[in-house]
């Protein structure tokens, strides 16, 4: 299956970001991608953390019907349907019961434009090195449940997909939980890693998650200097179950696109059946 991890440098303007996302989705679909994933906060990189509250959407029952309250979900659903692809909508702010906080939510759509999965980011990022300070808990509520779903590609092969977001990458127990019922074939991790933490740990941790779970990883990313002054690391990646980087987009708008193979995963798991050797569960 060909997959595309998209990379953006999103702005504070939702309409512009949606236009860029549509164009990238179309390019990936034209290149033959069956599964396409957008980065975290693809729809908005605001000047203030609270900017996302103003664009928060209620969860739509069916986003194919255009509604003034759910334009971001409508774009995702119609793009999936238009191009006949599986589409993972990075993250968007979904309204919560608290008017001062939202969920940072991944939404997955099938080629008919129907939502098949929702994952609310569980681990909220906090960082302070004396110069840069981030605290997502100021305006985000954490999710609670690991979420995985199964897609069937054009060849009729089933793929078990585990959903995660950015800071989740640092918590390997989440990925063990995602594969507890059925081993994962692919981890999808939309991100907006800071330039500082990305240089230190992005590739290291992505490859570790692939190797320890013996599965593929795709990581769409924000990658560049944003209008709000934030610098994101980029390096959208696709990685195989042996930790080999199959595709990477260093900086700027673009995509990491690659073919992933069940046969490669099966080969690695036969040669090194580490998942079967686990003692502590």
Image (spheres, grey):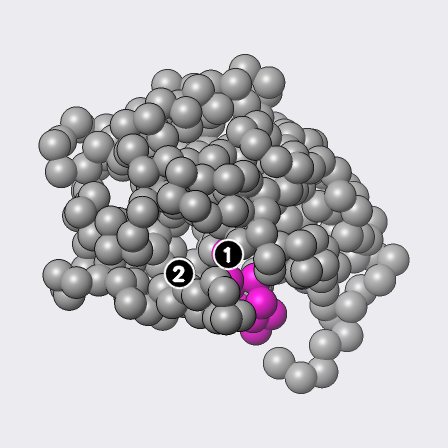
What residue sits 38% from the left and 67% below the top? 135
Label 2 neighbour load within 10 Å: few <14, some 14-19, many 20+: many
* Residue 213 percent location from the top left of the image: 68, 61
Q: Secondary structure at mark 2?
A: loop
Q: Is residue 160 above or below residue 114?
A: below
Q: Position of residue 68 (x, y in %)?
A: 12, 32
Residue placed most toward the observer, 35 or 239: 239
Rendered image: mark on residue 121: 2
Quadrant location, the N terminus: top right
In this view, the residue farthest toward the bottom is: 280
Q: Find residue 264 and report its image quarter.
A: top right
Q: Whole-percent x and y of residue 170?
A: 58, 67
Which of the two residues, 172 or 162, is positioned nearer the viewer here?
Answer: 172
Q: Residue at x 41, y 28 (%)?
A: 21
Q: Is residue 244 above or below residue 73?
A: below
Is residue 176 among what the camera can see?
A: no
Task: Please rate how many residues cluster around mark 1, counting C-alpha atoms within 10 Å: few if below 14, some from 14 to 19, many from 20.
Answer: many
Query: Earlier along the polypeptide chain: callout 2 or callout 1?
Result: 2
- Label 1: which secondary element: helix
Residue 178 covered by magenta stretch: no
- Please state if 15 lies on the left or on the right of 255 as rendered: left
Camera-side residue of 78 and 204: 204
Residue span colored magenta: 166-174
Can you say which quadrant of the picture contains the C terminus? bottom right
> What residue sits right under mark 1 in the picture?
166
> Label for residue 112?
none
Do labels 2 and 1 touch, CB within 8 Å? yes
Residue 240 pos. (x, y %) = 73, 46
What separation in Å lies between label 2 and label 1 (alpha carbons)?
Answer: 9 Å
Q: Is residue 96 visible?
A: yes
């Amino acid at each position: 299956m060909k997959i595309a991890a998209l990379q953006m440098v999103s702005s504070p303007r939702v309409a512009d970001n949606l236009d860029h996302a549509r164009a990238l989705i179309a390019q990936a679909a034209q290149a033959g991608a069956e599964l396409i994933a957008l980065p975290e906060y693809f729809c908005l990189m605001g000047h203030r953390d609270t900017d996302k509250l103003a664009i928060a959407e209620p969860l739509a029952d069916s986003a194919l019907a255009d509604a003034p309250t759910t334009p971001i979900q409508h774009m995702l659903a119609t793009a999936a349907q238009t191009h006949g692809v599986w589409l993972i909508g990075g993250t968007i702010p979904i309204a919560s019961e608290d008017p001062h906080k939202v969920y940072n939510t991944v939404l997955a759509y099938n080629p008919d434009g129907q939502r098949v999965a929702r994952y609310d980011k569980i681990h909220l990022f906090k960082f302070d090195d004396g110069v840069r300070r981030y605290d997502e808990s100021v305006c985000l509520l954490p999710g609670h449940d690991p979420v995985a779903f199964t897609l069937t590609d054009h060849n009729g092969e089933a793929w078990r997909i585990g959903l995660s977001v950015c800071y989740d990458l640092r918590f390997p127990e989440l990925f063990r939980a995602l594969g507890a019922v059925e081993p994962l074939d692919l981890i999808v991790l939309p991100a907006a890693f800071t330039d500082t933490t990305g240089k230190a740990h992005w590739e290291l941790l992505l490859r570790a998650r692939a190797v320890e779970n013996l599965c593929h990883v795709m990581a769409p990313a924000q990658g560049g200097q944003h209008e709000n002054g934030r610098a994101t690391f980029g390096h959208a990646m696709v990685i195989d179950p042996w930790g080999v980087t199959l595709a990477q987009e260093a900086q700027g708008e673009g995509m990491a696109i690659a073919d992933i193979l069940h046969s490669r995963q099966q080969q690695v798991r036969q040669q090194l059946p580490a998942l079967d050797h686990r003692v502590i569960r």
